[in-house]
Amino acid sequence: MILLKRLAMFASLMVVLCHSMTGAHAAADPVVLRVYTAPPIQPSAVPNKPAKGAVTGPLAAAFNISSLKALPQHTFVAQTPWYKNPVKFTGPLVRDVLAAAKVKGTVIHAIALDEYRVQIPFSDAQQYDMILAHQMDGQTLTAKNKGPLFVVYPYDSKPELQTVQFYERSIWQLKSIQVE
């Protein structure tokens, strides 16, 4: 039974990958971000606590680097607590990615490759020009240097962004988000 479930999950993943990529790009440009919506509310059911790293809602969109680069790109330089010198970040605005995925809500649950999770108010994406950085100082981000995606606020643009609260929302090695 477990093997059948795993095979079904693998088949579903392959369908998502095939729909999000075309031909020769499939191997070269894998999905780097999956966007999920909140699971439907079942009033008569007692909600089960999902397993660590599990996403319980339907898939709204899957993005590869090419599709993220097709969105308008933004670049800014900011001082961060993680680097000694200011860093130049490049990527699409989070609000543009959410709009492309056609999702709205009040909370963004961001999940990293190592299953680390943060909650980001949906309003942050509207209020601040935060980006999904795929480049840092002109270099493509990889899992070894906080990639493939890094949620970054324009920290130097407003004093309120230079606080622990916003630094903690800046998740790197982002793999998926769930909006509820």
Image (cartoon, rainbow, N blue to C red):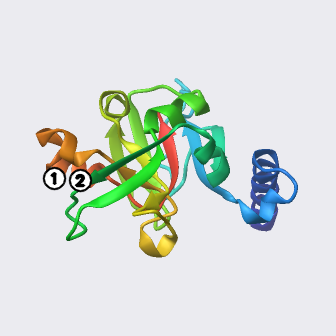
Number of marks present in the image shown: 2
The span from disc 1 to disc 2 (Cα, nearest Å) is 5 Å
Using residue 139 as the reference point, say whether residue 69 is left or right of it: right
Of residue 24 and residue 111, the one placed in the foreground of this image is 24
The secondary structure type at the circle numbered 2 is helix
The residue located at (15%, 48%) in the rendering is 162
List x then y, in percent, for residue 170: 32, 53
**Along the horizontal axis of the image, is 120 left or right of 74?**
left
Numbered badge on residue 145: none
Amino acid type at image mark 2: Tyr
Circle 2 packing at 10 Å, graded few (<14), some (14-19), many (20+), is: some
Residue 1 seen from this side: no
Q: Which quadrant is the N terminus positioned in?
A: bottom right
Above or below residue 146? Residue 168 is above
Q: Is residue 79 left or right of residue 41?
A: left
Name the spot of residue 144 as percent of width and height, x first.
Answer: 46, 76
Residue placed under numbered mark 2 in the picture: 167
Q: Residue furthest bottom?
A: 144
> In the picture, residue 56 is in which quadrant?
top right
Residue 61, relative to residue 134: is it above or below?
above
Instruction: Indicate the secondary structure of the residue bearing disc 1.
Output: helix
Look at the numbered discs 1 and 2 and tell me whether their residues touch, using CB distance below 8 Å: yes
Amino acid type, mark 1: Val
Residue at 75% over, 56% down:
9
Q: Badge 1: how crowded within 10 Å, few (<14), some, or many (20+)?
A: few
Which circle marks residue 164 in the picture? Answer: 1
Q: Quadrant of residue 88?
A: bottom left
Q: Which x, y percent locates residue 145?
A: 43, 72
Between residues 72 and 15, which one lies in front from this camera angle?
72
